[in-house]
Amino acid sequence: MKIFITRNLPTDLAQLNAYASVEVWPERQPPPYEVLLAKAKAVDGLLCLLTDKIDQQLIANSALKVISQMAVGFDNIDIAAATAQKIPVGHTPGVLTDATADLTWALIMAAARRVVEADRFTRAGLWRTWEPDLLLGPNVAGATLGIIGWGRIGQAVARRAQGFDMRILYTSNRKCQPEVEKCYGAEFVTLDKLLQTSDFISIHTPGNQETYHLLSDRQFALMKPSAILINTARGTIIDQEALYRALSQKQIAAAAIDVTDPEPLPMDSPLLTLDNLIITPHIGSASRQTRAKMADIAIANLIAGLKGDRLPYCVNP
Ligand code: DGY
């Protein structure tokens, strides 16, 4: 058996070596598409990341028995094509819930209390004295948090919000059980109502055709001028040109995004000129423990696929 891993992983590969000969792409940048195409023809198992485009062409021409993605999201993989070829696709749900909810909260707090701007201000030598109106932001405690997407991560964000005595609204494909709503003190509303009512809006829905540009000009127009938008899900969910208009025209107060479309964000993006926007480089799951667990699950999925067993975390229907 042969395996290709598209980047160095933060874990020990010893258990994999027992099953297959392992090749790891050694560079910091992802393998080019042509390399992926060639490897997919030559190996039994592929362990990939969200930066690797695993499309219909690659899948149809491959010898793969299993595709294992080290991420919970899999919008870079053509799942229908893999399913048609009977190739199981694995992912790593659950283990990154807390890390991603933590980063969401880091961004909520940083955007509300203007932490990044304040740091830039201090380093620029502008801190002359204590001023009554310096770098003011809104209260987080007691505010209304609107959560778009009520899966594991959305609920973990809500759990943390309870400590801030927030009113919690959520929108999702369906209303959840009353016991769950009660546990979080959360209220199911339409997307429009959530946008009109929330002080903080946080996105926790997968990136796919259904959620592509879910937030565009019409949705920004519904938000409060004081609203703060957070995105730790996928860049494609926000229409970035509309985001630029909303932030530059102060239609909303601020945003903090950990994901962009494309990634990385090109250095000539107008978004980089905005003071009321924080951008981090897709680090939602970036705690040491979380990344190690993600790698371990990706390896477990890969081994199961090579053995012909059901993957512990399988994406295909
Ligand atoms: C995921 O897993 O989908 C995150 O975006 C990266 O950890």
Image (spheres, rainbow, N blue to C red):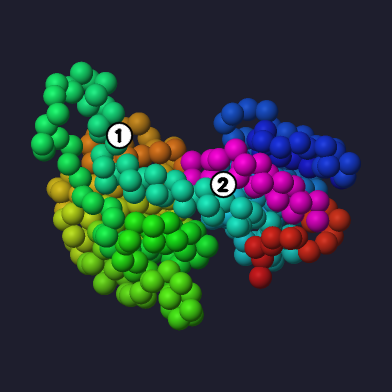
Circle 1 is placed at which residue position? 116
Nearest to N terminus: mark 2 or mark 1 = 2
**Residue 122 seen in this snapshot:** yes
Q: Looking at the image, which is closer to me, 185 or 120?
A: 185
Q: Disc 2 marks which amino acid?
A: Leu
Whole-percent x, y for residue 268 in the image: 31, 32
Residue 315, placed above or below residue 48: below
Q: Secondary structure at mark 2?
A: loop
Task: Give the image location of residue 80, x and y in percent.
Answer: 62, 64
SS class, disc 1: helix
> Which residue is painted at 73% across and 34% down in the image?
24
Vertical placement of 185 versus 237: above or below?
below
Asked if residue 293 is among those painted magenta in the image, a careful observer would answer yes
* Callout 2: CB less than 8 Å from ligand 1: yes
Provide the residue span drawn in magenta: 283-304
Between marks 2 and 1 in the image, the one whose residue lies nearer the viewer: 1
For disc 2, the neighbor class at 10 Å (few under 14, some 14 to 19, many from 20) is some
Q: Residue at x 34, y 56 (%)?
A: 164
* Residue at image mark 2: 50
For the C terminus, which image quadrant? bottom right
